[in-house]
């Protein structure tokens, strides 16, 4: 069963801007070590120096089915981050065409624990893409 939440509550821009100034470890320490709010340490930027902060649009697609990611992009607003729980799917969940669209829409970046294609092209675009 697919669930699509269209009424996404986003924090104020001032709060997001403050988070941009902090490191992940600082945020983790402030929230508390007993919580599970930090992503898997194996998820890394596709290029060195990439940073990403913004309201998350979370997606849990079926394996190798990126239509749900396309739907999430339709809901995304400028500054949003698409977070894809692909559970290590080897079917590419995104590529250069989706990245061009994301840039055009002003999406801040993508976090994915699955396969992507066109990695070199995405890296050249400078689009923040964190991947497992």
Image (cartoon, helix red, strand yellow):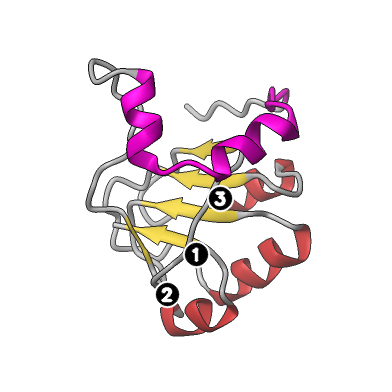
**Residue at figure coordinates x 33%, y 56% from the top left:** 114
Numbered range of the magenta stretch: 7-31
Q: Are marks 1 and 3 in contact (CB under 8 Å)?
A: yes
Of the numbered discs 2 and 3, the one sitting upstream in the chain is 3
Q: Mainly helix, strand or loop, the magenta region?
A: helix
> Image quadrant of residue 44?
bottom left
> Image quadrant of residue 48?
bottom left
Structural distance between the alpha carbons of marks 2 and 3: 14 Å
Q: Are marks 1 and 2 in contact (CB under 8 Å)?
A: yes
Q: Residues within 10 Å of mark 2 (few under 14, many from 20)?
A: some
Residue 105: percent from left, percent from top? 77, 58
Q: Secondary structure at mark 1?
A: loop
Q: Secondary structure at mark 2?
A: loop
Q: Which mark is residue 10?
A: none
Of the numbered discs 1 and 3, the one sitting upstream in the chain is 3
Q: Residues within 10 Å of mark 3 (few under 14, many from 20)?
A: many
Q: Which mark is residue 69?
A: 3
Check the image and report above or below for 14 versus 132: above
Check the image and report above or below for 132 versus 49: above
Q: Is residue 39 left or right of residue 93?
A: left
> Mark 1 highlights which residue?
94
Residue 127: percent from left, percent from top? 57, 68
**Residue at figure coordinates x 49%, y 57% from the top left:** 51
């Amino acid at each position: 069963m697919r669930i699509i939440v269209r009424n996404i509550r986003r924090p104020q821009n001032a709060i997001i801007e403050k988070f941009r100034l902090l490191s992940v470890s600082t945020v983790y320490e402030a929230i508390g070590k007993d919580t599970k709010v930090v992503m898997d340490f194996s998820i890394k930027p596709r290029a060195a120096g990439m940073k990403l902060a913004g309201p998350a649009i979370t997606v849990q697609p079926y394996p190798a089915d990126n239509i749900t990611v396309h739907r999430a992009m339709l809901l995304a607003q400028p500054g949003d981050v698409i977070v894809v729980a692909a559970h290590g799917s080897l079917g590419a969940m995104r590529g250069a065409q989706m990245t061009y669209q994301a840039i055009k829409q002003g999406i801040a970046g993508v976090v994915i624990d699955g396969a992507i294609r066109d990695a070199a092209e995405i890296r050249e675009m400078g689009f923040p893409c964190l991947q497992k």
